[in-house]
Image: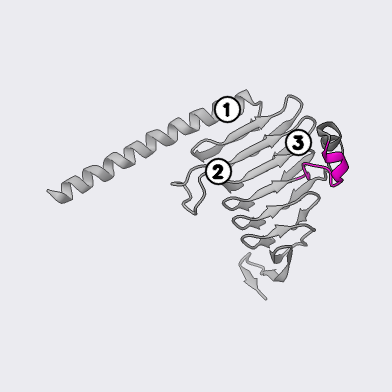
Amino acid sequence: MQSICNWLFRAFRRLFNILHNKFDYLICRILFYIQKVQVGKFSTRGRPYILIAAKGKCIIGNGFSMNNTISSNPIGLTQPCIFFVDNGATLEIRDNVGISQASIICHTSITIGNHVKIGGGVCIYDTDFHSLDPALRKDRKFDFANKKKKPVIIKDNAFIGAHSIILKGVIIGENSVVGAGSVVTKNIPDNEIWAGNPACKVRELIISTDNDPQYR
């Protein structure tokens, strides 16, 4: 009797998850449409927070996947993915990118290449949000007008570990890895592993001829 109950419970949970995921996909598709996001084929668990300004642009390629719930990626975060694009800014996410419960805040330009993996709780900012001058910060208008903005580029096959922060003006090289909890303040060359606060080089990542990565 107990085994039958367990089977019924698992079957019900599986059916519920399937229906719930389809509903989440539909809502997400509507959100993308309302926010004028150009998006290809995608999959989602849960629903993201999306805010694209009237003169902002967000382009997402094919094979995009995202986790927005604690059940879809139970690593201690409860927030959904957040996508914010300001007026005149462009967020471009290319093909086969995976992202979990991360925040991408674009005030000028953020470009994420193909096959990039972005871990849970990652924050990507292309702005300081506020002026570094305390006198200017006293006035909201002057504060925002004098904030610094620089494009962020994450190249193909990069992997950004959970809880990392990518700051303005940073270029992360092809195939490179950012260790969990890192704060990246300067460019990372191709094929390197960086970690820490501020992030620094840990080692090189050697890509063999058969695309099997090996560490040195």
Residue 139 percent across, percent down from the top left:
83, 34
Q: Which residue is drawn at 84% across and 31% down?
A: 141
Q: 10 Å neighbourhood of mark 1: few (<14), some, or many (≥20)?
A: some
Q: Give the mark nearer the N terminus: 1 vs 2.
A: 1
Residue 206 percent across, percent down from the top left:
69, 70
Task: Mark yes or no: residue 95 visible.
Answer: no
* Helix, strand or loop for disc 2: strand
The kind of residue on which mark 1 rests is Leu
Q: Indicate which disc residue 90 carries.
A: 3
On screen, residue 151 above or below 30: below
Label 1 or label 2, whichever lies nearer to me, is: 1
Magenta residues?
A: 126-138
Kindly check if marks 2 and 3 are in contact, taking CB atoms under 8 A apart as contact.
no
Residue matched to label 1: 31
Label 2 or label 3, whichever lies nearer to me, is: 3
Q: Give the mark nearer the N terminus: 2 vs 3.
A: 2
Q: Which of 145 and 208 is in front in this view?
A: 145
Which residue, as the protein is rendered here, is positioned at the far bottom?
216
The kind of residue on which mark 3 rests is Thr
Residue matched to label 2: 65
Task: Give the CA separation, mark 1 to mark 2.
Answer: 15 Å
Q: Is residue 214 left or right of residue 109?
A: left
Task: Give the CA separation, mark 2 to mark 3.
Answer: 20 Å
Residue 128 forms part of the magenta stretch: yes
Residue 197 forms part of the magenta stretch: no
On screen, residue 25 above or below 208: above
Task: Give the CA separation, mark 3 to mark 1.
Answer: 18 Å
Q: Is residue 117 left or right of residue 203?
A: left
* Helix, strand or loop for disc 1: helix
Task: Mark yes or no: residue 183 visible.
Answer: yes
Please identify the quarter of the rendering in which residue 49 is found. Answer: top right
Residue 172 percent across, percent down from the top left:
74, 56
